[in-house]
Image: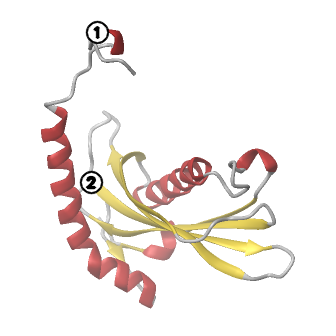
Amino acid sequence: MEAKYCKESRVIRTSRVFPNDVNNHNTLFGGKLMSDLDQVASISAARHSRRECVTASTDSVDFLHPVQPTDSVCFESYVTWTGTSSMEVFVKIIAEDLKSGKRKMAATALLTFVALNEKKRPTHVPQVIPETEEERKLHETAPERARMRKERKQKSKELATFLTTNQPWDRHVLC
């Protein structure tokens, strides 16, 4: 399987912030941003693998600056690193004031996707080749993030053994 450049999976999407996209603080609703970034990241994963992909985890979403109703929002994503069937996708979200042209990094995110074969089972993906300084930095720091993801998933599985799936009314707890 031939390796691919990060740029081959790059997705860029720009949209406006509309009144139904803002929260009670009159800034972009975080859940709207998260939904949009998952969609964009999933396209990067599919472009890289040329397979159906599923979101395995949202590893991090860091909100750096609020997005105002006068801003456009540009999502830029690409695959930064791959395992056997998994792909780490980086997304940067840039807000641009449409009147002044001033741009700021509104958020960054890292997500992990898994490529699936025709039987809906994990399948091999190509390695990734970084070219820019940004791509190289993300690529060289990815193995540590992958290790932390694995540890976090194990801890989540351990915690899940203590959680109940009973209906709320079966727990005798007042809410």
Mark 1 and mark 2: Cα distance apart in space: 40 Å
Q: How far across and down, in percent of the image, does residue 66 sit?
A: 63, 66
Tag in front: 1 or 2:
1
**Residue drawn at point x = 32 percent, y = 42 percent:** 117
Q: Amino acid at mark 2?
A: Ser
**Residue drawn at point x = 68 percent, y = 71 percent:** 95
Q: How far across and down, in percent of the image, does residue 127 sit?
A: 30, 69
**Residue drawn at point x = 28 percent, y = 73 percent:** 142
**Residue drawn at point x = 75 percent, y = 83 percent:** 102
Q: Among all residues in the image, which is located at the extreme right? A: 99
Give left or right: position of 126 versus 38: left
Placement of the N terminus among the 4 image quadrants? bottom left
Give left or right: position of 134 versus 36: left
Mark 1 or 2 closer to N-term? 2
Residue at numbered disc 1: 170
Residue 94, image quadrant: bottom right
Above or below 153: residue 101: below
Above or below 147: residue 52: above
Residue at numbered disc 2: 85
Placement of the C terminus among the 4 image quadrants? top left
Q: How far across and down, in percent of the image, does residue 103 sit?
A: 69, 80
Disc 1, SS:
helix
